[in-house]
Image: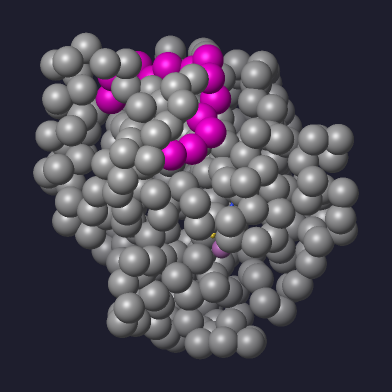
């Protein structure tokens, strides 16, 4: 791992996609290994990202949140409840070795090592807005694999109506898990059609680099039309279910955090409005968009549902 200098940290503070792209091209030409050179963060030392398809056409490419904010203002309760705790405690997350157990309602249950995930699936860059339930948002160039492509390999049966995701349980190392802030391990879930939707991503990197620990290394979910808490970090298990699985936030405060958690400016959180949000790095608040701006792609998944009741 390279030691980051102040200069390297400043250089990472790019907001403009073209600048980010030019810097990457320059590093490639200069033959610099990209991993660990740009982000001011603790990234797993051993992992390397193979080439990926960049996403220069995204309508969000000129709205990227600064890399330094993406990697230093986080929600990752296993590493502490303060926004700056995950970066401070990042080294406490042990990511090597890492594998995901896939089980439940599928023909071919198995264990997927992170190295195999990187070697066997096509990596893509996807610029997505992530909207936290706390009414702030970021725009992040993720690198990952379509979740559906991975799930298909395990051949879910016709009984598989839902899929559950589980975060690493390691209270000896993860300070947050020694306190009962949440029902550990962190668990999340999706309906099968949501999981198979091409927008759903298993992310392994961001800003051209291996995922930093504080952002959920080595592999996390990104479901851009749902509140951030659905995008579970540091996944060790995926389970197919016939029934809707229990999820950590829904168990801890069912009136505040529903199973669906679709971004919806018309349905307020019991303690605050969801109509507006603060883009991190901006002063003025902006209007929150239905399904976080992805309505055209995903609204049909919820046709006929009462989104006030099934929030
Ligand atoms: N395991 C785990 N996953 C998690 C969380 C968490 O505390 N633990 N926080 C969630 C919340 S509330 C948000 S907003 C996003 C934040 O992702 P980021 O820190 O990469 O921006 O991660 C989500 N995934
Ligand atoms: Mo969140």
Who's the residue at 32% across and 53% down the image? Answer: 66
Of 302 and 205, the residue lying toward us: 205
Q: Which residues are magenta?
A: 40-52
Q: Quadrant of residue 237?
A: top right
Q: Is residue 41 visible?
A: yes
Who's the residue at 51% across and 77% down the image? Answer: 307
- Is residue 241 toward the left or the right of residue 274 in the image? right
Q: Quadrant of the C terminus?
A: bottom right
Of 119 and 294, the residue lying toward us: 119
Of 92 and 292, the residue lying toward us: 92
Asked if residue 53 is positioned above or below residue 284 in the image, the reply reads above
Asked if residue 293 is positioned above or below residue 235 in the image, the reply reads below
Of 109 and 287, the residue lying toward us: 287
Q: Position of residue 187 (x, y in %)?
A: 71, 49
Q: Is residue 188 visible?
A: no
Confirm whether the magenta stretch covers residue 95: no
Q: Position of residue 243 (x, y in %)?
A: 73, 51
């Amino acid at each position: 791992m390279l030691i980051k200098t102040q200069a390297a940290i400043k250089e990472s503070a790019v907001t403009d996609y073209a600048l980010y792209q030019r810097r990457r091209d320059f590093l490639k030409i200069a033959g610099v290994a990209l991993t660990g050179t740009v982000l001011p963060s603790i990234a797993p030392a051993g992992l390397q990202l193979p080439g990926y398809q960049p996403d220069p056409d995204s309508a969000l490419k000129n709205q990227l949140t600064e890399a330094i904010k993406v990697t230093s203002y986080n929600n990752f309760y296993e590493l502490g409840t303060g926004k700056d705790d995950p970066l401070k405690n990042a080294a406490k997350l042990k990511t090597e070795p890492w594998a995901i157990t896939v089980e439940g309602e599928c023909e071919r249950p198995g264990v997927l090592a992170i190295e195999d995930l990187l070697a066997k699936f096509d990596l893509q860059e996807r610029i997505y807005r992530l909207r936290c339930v706390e009414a702030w948002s970021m725009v992040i160039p993720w690198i990952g694999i379509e979740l559906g492509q991975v799930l298909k390999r395990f051949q879910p049966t016709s009984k598989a109506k839902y899929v559950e995701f589980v975060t690493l349980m390691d209270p000896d190392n993860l300070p947050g898990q020694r306190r009962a802030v949440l029902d550990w391990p962190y668990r999340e879930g999706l309906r099968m059609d949501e999981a198979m939707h091409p927008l759903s991503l298993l992310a392994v990197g961001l800003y051209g680099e291996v995922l930093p620990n504080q952002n959920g290394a080595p592999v996390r979910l990104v479901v851009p039309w749902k509140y951030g808490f659905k995008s579970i970090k540091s996944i060790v298990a995926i389970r197919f279910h016939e029934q809707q699985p229990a999820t950590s936030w829904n168990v801890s405060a069912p009136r505040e955090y529903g199973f669906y958690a679709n971004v919806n400016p018309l349905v307020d959180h019991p303690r605050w409005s969801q109509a507006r949000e603060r883009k991190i790095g901006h002063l003025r608040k902006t209007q929150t968009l239905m399904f976080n701006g992805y309505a055209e792609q995903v609204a049909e998944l919820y046709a006929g549902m009462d989104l006030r009741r099934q929030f």
